[in-house]
Image: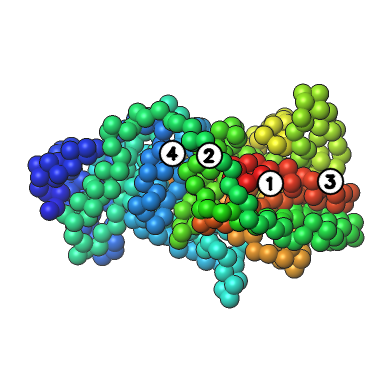
Amino acid sequence: MTVGHTSTALAERPDALLDEDDLRSLLDTCRYAVRRAATTDTPVLATWAVPVEVDDPAALWARGRGTATRSLLWRSAWGGGTVVALGSAHDLPGTGADRVAAVRRGWAALSRHAVAGGLPGGGPLALGGFAFAAGAPAAPGPLPDALFWVPALQLRTAADGTGELRLNAVLGRDGDAGRTADALARLADLVHPRDLGAVPAAPAPRPAAHLRSSTELPGAEEWKGLVRRATDRISAGDFAKVVLARELHVTVDAPFDVPAVVERMRRANPGTTLFAVDHDGQTFLGATPEYLARVEGRTVHALGLAGTTPRGATPAQDAEFERELTGSHKLRHEHDVVVRMLRDSLHGAGVEVAAAQPTRVLKLGTVQHLSTDVSGRLSHTDPAGILDFVERLHPTPALGGHPRERALHWLAEHEGFDRGWYAGVVGWSDAGGQGEFAVAIRSALLRGNTAVLYAGCGLVADSDPETEYVETRAKLRAMMSALEVE
């Protein structure tokens, strides 16, 4: 059966989202892509969309992720929008130090000849993430340096639930338009009309996972020793700041329920950006308070987030920790280093940086941070897009240190593990360079019944090893709670 037999297709799929006219339009779009591929002698992206209203996109992701080898859930803290991606229409590879630029070039080439049908809408997205640093070929990390793709199914919704379902495929000159359109229509069947207005439900109560093992890497005393070595090098003038991380490896008695973990993260961490990327049997997920960059129209946004104290157990204690945060010379200096770098980098990219915004205190479930928004305007002749700013800004001093190259060299020599995607970036870009990228902190990598959790601290000359260790424990606590292994 092909999508051309629309009556049969609808009869066989009574709960299908797409009607007969939709199926014809989808088939026409795929046929047009094949013809353009023959004309341009290059594979062509066919993208087709229909408007939808969805109350709980995460529920659709939870149901559909089991049908795809790759998926993504993204819920933005900055606009309230959500992106769900299932399957891959086309991968955009990138490795090594050139990984972001390679993805940017591949996305520009693919989107140049795209053929669109259905709702004009927001267009197709390229999405995924990048590791903190380029992995050594002989010892690659658990996730690739770059995992970026155009999804086969893309659901994008605004905070009010309105949005679009978009189907994507790449066809060559010999592509089978009917077979491709039929496969896309069947993928769209994951989005049943009766489920679009579903009310989000809390995860069913269940006993906490039984913890089999928990191992810190490096161990507590070894890590505190590394803090002392780092502050010695800062005092000696090697660099002004370095961000030192550590891992916590956890094993429990049953596989983690990933959608339940995501829902607990969402409920416990309002004001953060939620992300989950499934790939090759593992899930990298987190609830991050920090974005690296956003491009909206001609406006570029970045966020300086550095300087941390715990939340208090009482309002009085919480206020005391806040006074410590805002009054600490050490914490203000750590924060200012990040903000200066962001302003200088945006200015160097030709962005007309706006006047400095006041620093505020961002309060999360277990910690509070100094936070400063940095933004500016692109000129109308500047073609820079979100991936250009990812390449320019990452890693900020809040993730690696300052000066960047000296701090990163010290980390490569001394930190002792591959961060993978921790402190990397996750996000999306449309074909016009609009997009959002979050910093992948407050995160974990899950595979079956094992999890690797990450936390780091920004160190300056007068950082205290015990205080920094306590800070990492506070940062890990939110993810431990989401995993129910406290």
Instruction: Name the residue carrying label 3.
Output: 467
Compared with 371, 337 (above or below) is below
Q: Amino acid at mark 1?
A: Leu
What is the number of the mark on residue 10?
A: none
Instruction: Name the residue carrying label 1.
Output: 476
Q: Residue drawn at (43%, 60%), measured in percent from left and top?
A: 92
Instruction: Please rate how many residues cluster around mark 4, counting C-alpha atoms within 10 Å: few if below 14, some from 14 to 19, many from 20.
Output: many
Is the C terminus in the top left, top right, bottom left or bottom right quadrant?
top right
Instruction: Name the residue carrying label 4.
Output: 58
The Cα–Cα distance between marks 1 and 4, rounded to whole angstroms, is: 24 Å
Q: Earlier in the sequence, mark 4 or mark 2?
A: 4
> Where, by quadrant of the figure, is residue 226 drawn?
bottom right
Q: Residue drawn at (73%, 42%), measured in percent from left and top?
A: 474
Q: Residue drawn at (49%, 32%), measured in percent from left and top?
A: 202
Q: Earlier in the sequence, mark 1 or mark 4?
A: 4
Instruction: Name the residue carrying label 2.
Output: 206
Compared with 302, 408 (above or below) is below
The Cα–Cα distance between marks 1 and 2, rounded to whole angstroms, is: 22 Å
Please tell me whether mark 4 or mark 2 is closer to you in this view.
Answer: 2
Instruction: Please rate how many residues cluster around mark 2, counting C-alpha atoms within 10 Å: few if below 14, some from 14 to 19, many from 20.
Output: few
Q: Amino acid at mark 4?
A: Ala
Q: Earlier in the sequence, mark 1 or mark 3?
A: 3
